[in-house]
Amino acid sequence: MKTLKILLFLFLSISIFSQHKEVAITFKKNTELFGYIIELADPSENDKNNPIYKIIHSYEEDLNNDSMTKIFEIGGSMGYGFLENFCYILPELPFDNTFDIENHIRNIYEHLSNEKSIQLIKLANALNQFALTSNFQTVFDNLEPYRDKIQLLLEENKPSFELLQELETFYNRKFENYIIVPSITIWPSAAFGGFENNMKTAVFTLGPLEINFNFSNSKSFKELAIHEFGHSFVNDHVLKNSDIIKETNHLFSPMKETMYPQGYHNWETCLIEHFVRAGEVIIPELLNDAESSNSLMDEYVKNRQFNYLPFIVEKLKYYRLVKKYTYNDAVRQTLIELKNIPQ
């Protein structure tokens, strides 16, 4: 009997531990390279006397590197979100000459046409060549003390277990791991969501929360975590409803003028943003933070013109929290009702 009790205790302890997920915070060299390239081409509004700015801009001649021209020729129309994710999934640059980059890319992007795959292979080789021939390695090394300080700061403010638990409960989905990738070189307030490890790991990348490489705004950090991890939960649930997305495409017309400057150039991406932001409004309310919930709703509707957000929030709360639908079914039912919303 004593042995049985010990085994039961160990089982319960392991179960509790396995459920107590935490967020890993880690810098990625490739992400810093992506930010460095963009910063050289389009400098941010940071104080030029800031020591971090001076390090990043120590070698302005890198802007004239032949590989820089190729990178923008090939990737200029791909969008920063795609390019950041592309750099993230590549092996650390510069990669070994024996590494089969062609096979690596074709395996990851197996759904792409041969023409597009060739384009990405050329982009990877251009990035690799830039990493080899530019001064990026020196810049990266010189930024190490600042990365260490930022790491400690973000560790203190990283999303709690309770927040992750609420996200998983609301979205009916669990990830084995959560990773936050900060970047000193990416422009202020930029953030990207994504996956790795066959969608078992949710990832979000963020630049400084404010200008002058400031990562100290804990409120913005928490809101960004809900938003970008929200993409990991939300995107495919929305996209699987392609039939209704087509039927509601007309709803994008009145929003084009305000959505385009924010980077949302079609109804599909605009709709995903509505559902992600709906989660941002609902999750704080579930965590008894009505002030943040109301503040975000005002910001997104009044200042960002996400006009369908109140309707989507109302319907999601009804189907997910009252009717107890799965998140997937709540999304579909909300989309069905969206077809009849007056413009």
Image (spheres, helix red, strand yellow):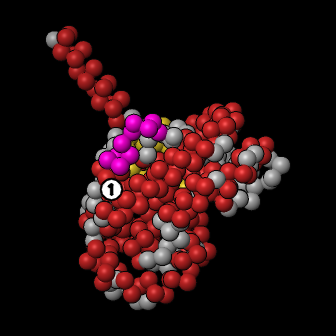
The x, y position of residue 329, in whole percent, is: 25, 65
Residue displayed at 70% across by 35% down: 142
Above or below residue 27? Residue 169 is below
Q: Nearer the viewer, residue 189 or 339?
A: 189
Residue displayed at 44% across by 63% down: 276
Residue at the extreme bottom of the image, as rendered: 342
Residue displayed at 51% across by 40% down: 94
The x, y position of residue 20, in whole percent, is: 39, 35
Quarter of the figure with the N terminus: top left
Above or below residue 141? Residue 226 is below
Quarter of the figure with the C terminus: bottom left
- Is residue 115 visible to us here? yes
Corner quadrant of residue 236: bottom left
Residue at the extreme top of the image, as rendered: 2
**Any magenta on residue 319?**
no
Amino acid at dot 1: Tyr
Part of the protein shown in magenta = 95-104
